[in-house]
Image (cartoon, rainbow, N blue to C red):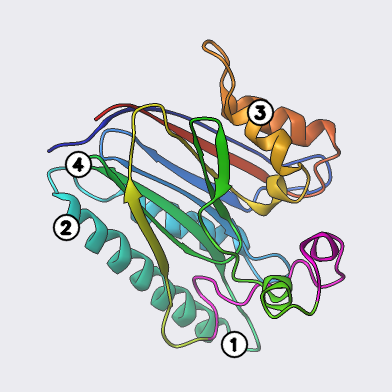
Amino acid sequence: MSVPGCRSWAMTHVGVVRTHNEDAFVDRPDLGLWAVADGAGGHDSGEVASGMIAAALTAVPEGLDAGQLLAQVRLRLIGTHEALREEAERRGGRSIIASTVVALILRDGHFACLWAGDSRAYLLRAGEFRQISHDHSLVQELVDCGAITAAEAEHHPHANVITRAVGTEAETLEIDKVIGEAIAGDRFLLCSDGLSKMLGEAEIAALVAAPEGISPAEALVAATLARGANDNVTAVVVEVVRR
């Protein structure tokens, strides 16, 4: 398989307020697959949902080409969505067992990013840092339609309301995707909102660009903890070393 040379760093932490961690991550540089899942806040058993996503993606077998890997990721996310909805129905009441997800695939000099929810993917390339995912959240919809500004969204009372996730009541899971070229030196960041809502974009960019010998994932988590980390925090950083 033509998996680009890469290296990755991953770390998750419960934070300084929560008592248990509802985040999970996948770190499969051998396969060219990484992911972050964040159990939906305010719902039942978010750690169950994020754990099921991580387990499903971690179990993707080796030996797949790029198209097969992309198909497997989609199928496993859809299968997890259906399983979580069935478990919620079994529990009865108004139970929802859900999680956001953002996944990155690197193959053949290209990347594919898939997501549902507000866990984010960023790309640092030649000093330029940008978000490549687009939040599925109520405040993002308000920003998109011009009702509020991006700055106002950061402190909006409904900032934690997501509009899409794995395991929600929606019968069909909608997964967004963006694809592009992967260039030597690129660094991708996948993170839960416990990080992106605590640190500014410029600070995140500087930490993603951590010099040799420093784990950017550990640096990002440490900076979030220093700010008071009122949520679980997870960071996965992937660097393209060669094509």
Q: Earlier in the sequence, mark 3 or mark 1?
A: 1
Instruction: Indicate left or right for 103 with 64 as reference.
Output: right
Q: Which residues are magenta?
A: 148-169
Residue 95 image point, x, y percent? 63, 81
Q: CA distance from mark 4 to mark 3?
A: 28 Å
Please give the residue where the numbered disc 2 appears in the rendered image: 68
**Which quadrant would residue 227 be assigned to in this image?**
top right
Can you identify the residue that label 1 sits on? 92
Q: Say if the magenta span includes residue 58.
A: no
Q: Secondary structure at mark 2?
A: helix
The residue tagged 3 is 206
- Residue 223 location, x and y as percent? 75, 30
Q: Amino acid at mark 4?
A: Asp
Residue at coordinates 51% horizontally, 54% vertically from top-left?
132
Residue type at mark 3: give it: Ala
Q: Secondary structure at mark 1?
A: loop
Callout 4: few (<14), some (14-19), or many (20+) C-alpha neighbours within 10 Å? some
Give the crowd class for mark 3: few <14, some 14-19, many >=20 residues within 10 Å: some
* Helix, strand or loop at mark 3: helix
Name the N-terminal-most of marks 2 and 4: 2
Tell me the CA gap for discs 2 and 4. Answer: 13 Å
Magenta segment includes 167 = yes
